[in-house]
Image (spheres, rainbow, N blue to C red):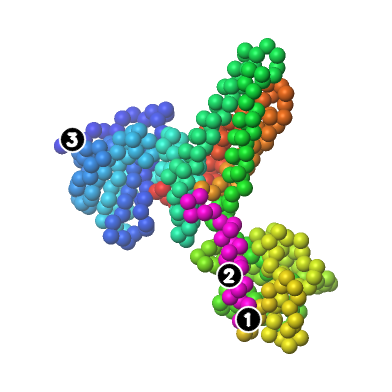
Amino acid sequence: MSLRSLPPFSAEQPDTVFALSSGRPPAAISIIRISGPHAHLAGEQLAGELPAVRTAAVRRLTDPASGELLDEALILRFDAPHSATGEDIVELQCHGGRAVVDVLLGCLAAQRRLRPAEPGEFTRRAFANGRIDLTQAEGLADLIEAETELQRKAALRVAEGGLRERIEQWRERLVELSARAERLIDYVDEEDDEGDPTLRGDCAEFRADLEEWLCRPRAEPLKDGVSIVVAGPPNSGKSSLVNAIAGYERAIVSPVPGTTRDHIELPLALGGLPVVLTDTAGLRDTEDEVEAIGVGRASALAASADILLWLGDDPAPDHPRAVLVHARADLPEREIVPEGRTAVSAVDGTGLTELLADLTSTVAAMMPGEDQIALNRRQAMHLALAVNSIAEAECSADLAVLADGLRLARSEFDRISGRLGVEDVLDTLFNRFCLGK
C-alpha cells in the first residue's frame, strides 16, 4: 500500500508533536502519543492504514525508511476537534522495552514536521483549543502530583470541571446583572434605579455568595501540608516533642542551650492529612551571630505558621491557632500544669495522644470537605478582586459606575478560567507537567 507523503509546511499550522506518555521503560506496555495536523500521516508512516476513528486495531510498525519491522502494537486514532488536545491524535500502545520505545521515537523524530513535545504541551494544546479551561489544567497538575487520597479526590473534582461549571454559573449571573444595569442606563431618564429597584440588592446577594466561597478552606494546605511550628525558649523540650510526634529521632536533643540553630522540617501525615512539622531554634537574646540568624528565622516561622505549638512561658505569642504546651511534664518541678496548657511528656508519653488528637482535628478543619471544591491562591485572588469590584459598584449612586464594576468583576472571572490575561502563569503551570502529558 502506498502512503501519502506529508504536505508542504504551513506557518499557519502548529507543529505536530510526539512523546512517550507512559512511564519510562522497561514496562509491559508503553504509550506514544502524536498530536497535531500531521499526526494521522505520521501514524500512517509507521503503521500503514489507521483504524477508524476511536477504534483500536493491531498494526505492524515498520521503519518508513527501510521497511524493517519494529514492533506490533495497538493503534488508536482520534480526529480533531473531538480529542484530548482538540487536534488529530494517534496513540501507539507498543511493547514497553527500552529498545522498542527508542527506535519508535527515533523514527518519529526523523519525520518532517514532527518534533518532541515539551513538558505539558499536550495539556497546553487542550487549553489553547478550548478542550479544558485553566482551572482544569491546574487540577490536572495537582492530580499528577497527588500523594494522598484526599489530594487525589480534591484535584479530580477540579480537573473534571467542577470549578469551571461554577464559574460559568457565576458569569451567567453577572451577565444578567450587567444587562439590567445597562438597560437602566439606556432607558431611565435620571441616574437612579427606580426602573429596577431590586438590582442593588441582587448584586449584594451575589457578592455574599462569592464571599462565602472565599471563606472556605483553600487548596494550599491540602497540597503543601499544614505548617505546624514548634517554638519556645532554649531547653524547653521542642526537639524532644518533635521526635515524639514524628515517631523517630530526627532532631538532635541535648541539654546544651542553643543546640538547634536552624529549623528542621518534617513532612508527616496526621490522620492521613498532610502536615509539615518544624523544629526551630530556641528564642532568646544571643550574641552568637549564627544562633541569632536561627532565632530570627524561628520568629518568622512562628509568626507565619498555620498552627503554633508554643512551649514557652506566658505571655504566649499572639497567634490565631496557638496551642500552649506544658512540655517535660514528667519532671517533678513541672507537676503543676498552668491553666489553658496541655501537659505533654516526650519521655513517658503523657498527653501525646490528646495533643495529636487536637492537632488532627485542627488540621482537618483547615482542609476542604470531601465533596468541596477548594480554590487555590491564584483563583481566590481573582475572586476577591471580583468581590471588591461588585462591593464598590454597589456603593455608587451612578449607574455607569455600577455597570463598570460588574464588567470588571466579569473580567476577573475570565482570568480565573483563563479566557483573559493569563499568559504570565501558563509557562509556570505547564512546566509542572511531565513529558507526554
Is residue 126 rendered to the left or right of residue 107?
Answer: right
Spatial CA span between label 1 and label 2 = 13 Å
Judge whether 200 appears above or below 47 on screen: above
Which residue is drawn at the image coordinates 70% and 17% (left, top)?
A: 191
Cα separation, mark 3 vs mark 1, equals 80 Å
The location of residue 168, given as percent across then percent down, is: 50, 34
- When the figure is inspected, residue 435 is found, relative to residue 424, above or below; the finding is below
Viewer-proximal residue among 402 and 111: 402
Residue at which label 2 appears: 357
Magenta span covers which residues? 349-372
> How far separated are the C-alphas under marks 2 and 3?
71 Å
Give the image quarter of residue 29.
Answer: bottom left
**Dot placed on the residue nearer the N-terminal end, 3 or 1:** 3
Q: Residue at x 64, y 23 (%)?
A: 197
Q: Is residue 155 left or right of residue 113?
A: right
The number of numbered badges drawn on the structure is 3
Q: SS at mark 1?
A: loop
What residue did someone put label 3 on? 2
Side of 307 where 61 appears, left or right? left
Residue 311 versus residue 35 in the image, above or below: below
Q: Say which amino acid is labelled 3.
A: Ser
Q: Nearer the viewer, residue 57 or 48?
A: 57
Mark 2, secondary structure of its residue: helix
The amino acid marked with disc number 1 is Thr
Name the front one of labels 3 and 1.
Answer: 1
Please give the residue where the numbered disc 1 appears in the rendered image.
Answer: 350
Locate residue 305, reporting x and y percent: 67, 61
